[in-house]
Amino acid sequence: MRRAIVPAVGTLGLLIAAGPSGSAAAAPPGPTPQAFTGTVLGDDIMSNGTSFENAWKVTDSIHGTGAGWNQGSNSSTTLPLTGHASGAEYFADGVKRFKETYTIGAPNASGIAVLTGSGHCIAGGTGAFKDRQCKFAEMGTVDVNTGIFDVKLTGTYTR
């Protein structure tokens, strides 16, 4: 009886050490998501009808402080409106290129309107953003009297 038990235990030990299959251990890892938050504080630098350009300071919880620029168009010259833009953010470790869509609501009595939107990274990033994908949501305010916007970002980078 002892002879039958020893080989069975030996085989079980071999299976535990080797794993269920050699190919499963060699499989490449899947995408690794990395959550981030950010703050954007900026202003209009050009507005012509429904077309615009913006510039801003950005702080990203992973990539630090940088500067951003975008251009886009709005559905209207009066609020509320929807719009879309594409642009870039410049950090010490690379350039993130992105596209976004957003909605700006009607302003309150003080001229402050709520901005909500979402976006994603596009091809053309450099450095840390060369092979990185991202998705983000944005929520903040726009002062319609000055053009200054203050937006919080939450999102995920994936490599």
Image: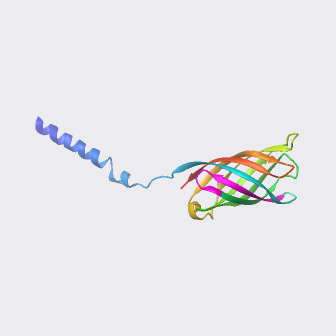
Give the camera-side residue of 113 and 5: 113
Residue 155's place in the image compared with 130, above or below, is above
The overriding secondary structure of the stretch rendered in magenta is: strand
Q: Residue at x 65, y 53 (%)?
A: 59
Give the camera-side residue of 8 and 87: 87
Give the camera-side residue of 45 and 32: 45
- Magenta span contains residue 112: no
Farthest residue to the top: give it. 1
**Would residue 101 appear left or right of 64 to someone viewing this image?**
right
Percent position (x, y) of residue 62? Answer: 58, 52
Q: Which residues are magenta?
A: 51-65
Residue 130's place in the image compared with 5, above or below, is below
Q: Residue at x 83, y 59 (%)?
A: 51
* Colouring method of the image: rainbow
**Would residue 143 appear left or right of 98 to someone viewing this image?**
right
Percent position (x, y) of residue 152? Answer: 69, 46
How many dots with numbers? 0
- Magenta span contains residue 56: yes
Percent position (x, y) of residue 69? Answer: 73, 60
Residue 152's place in the image compared with 69, above or below, is above
Q: The N terminus is located in which quarter? A: top left
**Would residue 117 appear left or right of 27 to someone viewing this image?**
right
Percent position (x, y) of residue 78? Answer: 88, 49
Residue 125's place in the image compared with 158, above or below, is below
